[in-house]
Image (cartoon, grey):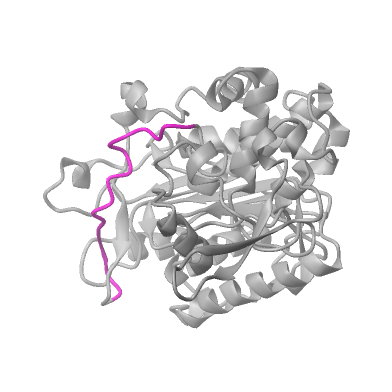
């Protein structure tokens, strides 16, 4: 079997057999980065000057849903300060959610949405764990149809407009990935009377020395100038430039569910701080809360069905027998305030209680407090759920837990 670095050098090598764009891998412990390696360049576009620029720990990437953990930390900080309560009705802060409606269908003739009043309340806990009934218009056909009916432009209008969509089900009865964490970010803004970006800068980014992180790329030319291009998976399986110009305009709002631009060297500091557990971000009891399973029977069934579907898509496209290390299907997973949580030890070494999630351009992270390990994989590749990238991340995780990289629980590995 090829070594980890041989595997990635081959996978990112320019040419017709290229499997991956540039990527960054980091493994860390409570003392800091124990292993890091950058592969490839900032672009796969042969006419871009970035095609010759090496990817580094300071290369700017859209980290998308990796933003969610920082928003969850911000919300739990507000709980610690007595500004928010996890189980209060969110309408005490977000008045527009006083009488939420559930989308049950559309009129055949007019296409007008059919809405019914929700009986239960929505709570901050539900927002953070995707039990609120909210979804994403780009992932749910019914919400997309509703948004088109209302002529909203998803992601370009303020959160209070584009993300104010009807619910998919009664709050607390199922699970759906959606805009709940964007609304949790709105709650942080309203109780602190500042933008989510300003709050995170004061309470997360500056304390951790995250100087290359922002919601507002156009206002930070120093961060913008470091950006990587977005790539995409071609129909023939190759990696080609993406026409997506994610870096051209700032969103009108600080989207807590996916709006942050950062770099690998900055983002990993959040995971290291949670491993360190020294009170810089949260009290120890709050970090425990962040990774405590939250889903009751109804939502957990829906969550696991969703994860199995995603898992099967990953496995269907796996390439190369050497990447097929034994990785558990997500039948023993739950969801916590901070992300997906393992309820049992995995065969690859990941421990029960580990948090994990990722970001749309095929980013992934794991926080394993029992093993004292954090690991993350950073790339800019569309569409999400790329099987080759998943295989690569599994190869990296195998190297970390198998000891191929040494004992990542110590700070004595070469970088």
Q: Name, please, the residue furthest toward the front.
A: 109
Q: Position of residue 186 (x, y in %)?
A: 61, 33
* Camera-nearest residue between 45 and 149: 149
Answer above or below: position of 289 versus 328. Answer: above
Residue 239 is inside the magenta segment: yes
Residue at image location 76% in from the left, 26% down from the top: 78
The residue at 50%/82% (across/down) is 316
Q: Residue at x 59, y 57 (%)?
A: 135
Residue 63 visible in the shown view: yes
Work out whether 37 lies above or below 253.
below
User: Which residues fall within the magenta stretch?
Assistant: 237-253
Foreground of the two, 250 or 54? 250
Count the marks: how many?
0
Q: Taking 15 as reference, is 105 left or right?
A: right
Query: Residue at horizontal 75%, vertical 74%?
Result: 331
Magenta stretch, overall SS:
loop
Locate residue 356: give its quadrant: bottom right
Q: Is residue 193 magenta?
A: no
**For residue 404, side relative to residue 316 (left or right):** right
Quadrant housing residue 397: bottom right
In the image, 292 versus 131, the foreground residue is 131
Q: Which one is in front, 224 or 322?
A: 224
Image location of residue 247, percent across then percent down: 31, 38
Q: Residue furthest left?
A: 47
Q: Percent position (x, y) of residue 220? A: 36, 22
Locate residue 204, reporting x and y percent.
63, 25
Whether residue 347 is visible: no
């Amino acid at each position: 079997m090829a070594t980890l670095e041989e595997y990635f050098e081959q996978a990112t090598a320019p040419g017709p057999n290229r499997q991956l764009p540039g990527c960054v891998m980091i493994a860390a412990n409570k003392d800091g980065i124990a292993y890091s390696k950058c592969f490839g360049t900032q672009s796969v576009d042969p006419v871009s000057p970035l095609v010759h620029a090496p990817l580094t720990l300071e290369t700017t990437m859209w980290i998308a849903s990796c933003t969610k953990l920082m928003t969850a930390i911000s919300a739990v900080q507000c709980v610690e300060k007595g500004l928010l309560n996890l189980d209060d009705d969110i309408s005490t802060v977000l008045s527009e959610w006083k009488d939420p409606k559930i989308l049950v269908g559309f009129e055949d003739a007019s296409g007008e949405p059919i809405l019914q009043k929700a009986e239960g309340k929505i709570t901050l806990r539900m927002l953070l764990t995707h039990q609120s009934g909210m979804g994403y218009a780009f992932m749910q056909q019914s919400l997309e149809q509703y948004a088109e009916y209302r002529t909203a432009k998803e992601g370009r209008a303020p959160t209070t407009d584009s993300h104010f969509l009807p619910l998919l089900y009664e709050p607390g009865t199922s699970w759906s990935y959606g805009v709940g964490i964007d609304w949790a970010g709105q709650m942080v803004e309203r109780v602190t009377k500042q933008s989510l970006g300003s709050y995170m800068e004061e309470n997360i980014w500056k304390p951790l020395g995250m100087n290359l992180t922002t919601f507002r790329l156009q206002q930070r030319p120093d961060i913008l100038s470091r950006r990587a291009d977005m790539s995409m998976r071609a129909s023939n399986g190759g990696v080609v430039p993406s026409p997506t110009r994610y870096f051209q305009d700032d969103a009108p709002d600080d989207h807590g569910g996916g709006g942050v631009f950062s770099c690998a060297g900055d983002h990993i500091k959040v995971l290291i701080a949670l491993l360190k557990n020294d009170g810089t971000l949260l009290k120890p009891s709050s970090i425990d809360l962040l990774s405590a399973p939250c889903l009751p029977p109804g939502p957990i069934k829906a969550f696991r069905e969703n994860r199995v579907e995603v898992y099967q898509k990953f496995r269907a496209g796996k390439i190369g027998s050497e990447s097929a290390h034994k990785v558990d299907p997500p039948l023993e997973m739950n969801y916590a305030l901070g992300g997906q949580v393992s309820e049992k030890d995995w065969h690859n070494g990941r421990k029960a209680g580990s948090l994990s999630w990722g970001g749309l351009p095929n980013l992934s992270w794991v926080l394993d407090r029992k093993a004292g390990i954090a690991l993350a994989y950073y790339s800019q590749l569309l569409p999400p759920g790329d099987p080759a990238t998943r295989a690569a991340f599994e190869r990296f995780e195998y190297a970390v837990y198998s000891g191929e990289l040494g004992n990542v629980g110590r700070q004595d590995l070469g970088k």
